[in-house]
Image (cartoon, grey):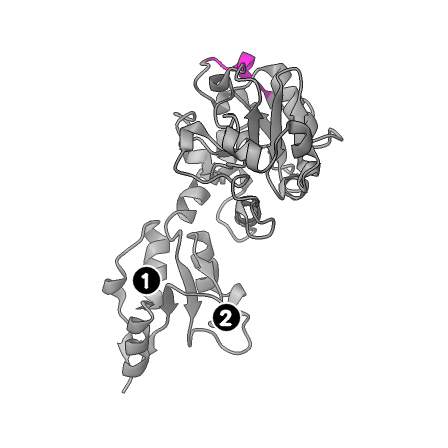
Amino acid sequence: MVFPQDSSGLYSSSFSIMGVHDDTHKANLKAYGGMCMDCVNEAFRSKYLKTPEELLQHKFKDSLFRVQPWALMTKLRPFVHTFLKEASTMFELHMCTMGKRDYASKMVEFLDPEKVYFKSRVIAREDLVDSEEKSLDLVPRYKRMAIILDDNLHVWKHDQSNLILVQKYFYFNSKSAKSIASFSALNTDEDETTGVLATILEKLKLIHRLFFNPKSKGGLVHRDVRSILANLRVLQGCKLTFKGNFPPSLKPENSCLWLMAEELGAICSMDDVLTPFTHVVTCAATAEESQQAELDKTILVHPRWLHACYDACKRYPEKDFQVELKN
């Protein structure tokens, strides 16, 4: 994908959004690294979907496709079409695959049947300098503008600072991941609204907003998406709420503290009913509030903690920024 305002790239691998089943054991599985291409085991096929034709009549028939002439079956990840549609409004989409060009073209047909997202921006195995490695050098864009989506960290040896790692999609059983129960074996699928692609789409929207933030220092020529991605990892996994920090006239999401927390990868909310928080950012707390936080395994931390983390682009120990105790 590419920032359309500047023709820059968000590089996307289809392997994070598809699963593949090989009927015949004849496909070169290694050539299509990153996709689940092991066959559905016989126990599953006899119990649930006895033939490929029966599978195509399943409730997921709109996302299941036969891939000829390789006698494969591919399953699109839920939400993928919505993901591509919305992402394409922010970025120019590219695909990079270790599969051969004819195979890649077939996958693009399933992902982009109207040919509006990828067009000719497909890098296949024949284009790779090293058949075991992908590289942003093959994209005619500045690396500071490029984001990679892939479920394999190791194939991007020189561009990992541009990578958002995507959880693998195991719809079919995989011999390489025997400990993971596939969605097909569970007779279910990933949730569209809370699944991996929906979560990543929200992250991409945030990255886009931060990159083009008019309040950021310097012009676009000085912006680097790698710095944004590094910042987003600082407080990744933290869920913050704020108490006593904002005047009634100010929307919390417009505050400096809130925006800093988002830039550091934290999730912010003022809803203390539906959201299980990890941190409460506040200047002071009563003894009772402190005890309750301890029972809830929630960390009370002073706003100075956020400022320090933001300035240094690293996570400081919360114990060094304790809140004051009210009388």
Q: Is residue 242 left or right of residue 11?
A: left
Q: Earlier in the sequence, mark 2 or mark 1?
A: 2
Q: What's the CA distance linking mark 2 and mark 1?
A: 21 Å
On whether residue 126 falls in the magenta region, the answer is yes
Residue at position x 60%, y 22% from top?
A: 72
In the picture, the quarter occupied by the N terminus is top right
Of the residues tagged 2 and 1, which is closer to the observer? 2
Q: Is residue 327 left or right of residue 60?
A: left
> Who is closer to the viewer here, 52 or 74?
52
In the picture, the quarter occupied by the C terminus is bottom left
Residue 63 percent coordinates (x, y): 67, 36
Tell whether label 1 touches label 2 (CB within 8 Å): no
Q: Is residue 308 left or right of residue 117?
A: left
Point out the residue furthest to the left here. Answer: 320
* Kind of element beneath mark 2: loop
Residue 274 percent coordinates (x, y): 50, 68
Q: Height in image: 211 above or below 13?
A: below
Residue 157 percent coordinates (x, y): 39, 25
Circle 1 is placed at which residue position?
A: 305
Residue 3 percent coordinates (x, y): 60, 37
* Kind of element beneath mark 1: helix
Circle 2 is placed at which residue position?
A: 271
Which region shows up in magenta? 123-129
Q: Quadrant of residue 277?
A: bottom left
Q: Quadrant of residue 297?
A: bottom left
Residue at position x 32%, y 50% from top?
A: 314
Q: Residues within 10 Å of mark 1 (few under 14, many from 20)?
A: some
Q: Is residue 212 left or right of residue 181?
A: right
Q: Height in image: 206 above or below 134?
A: below
| Residue 111 appears anywhere in the view | no
Q: Height in image: 64 above or below 309?
A: above
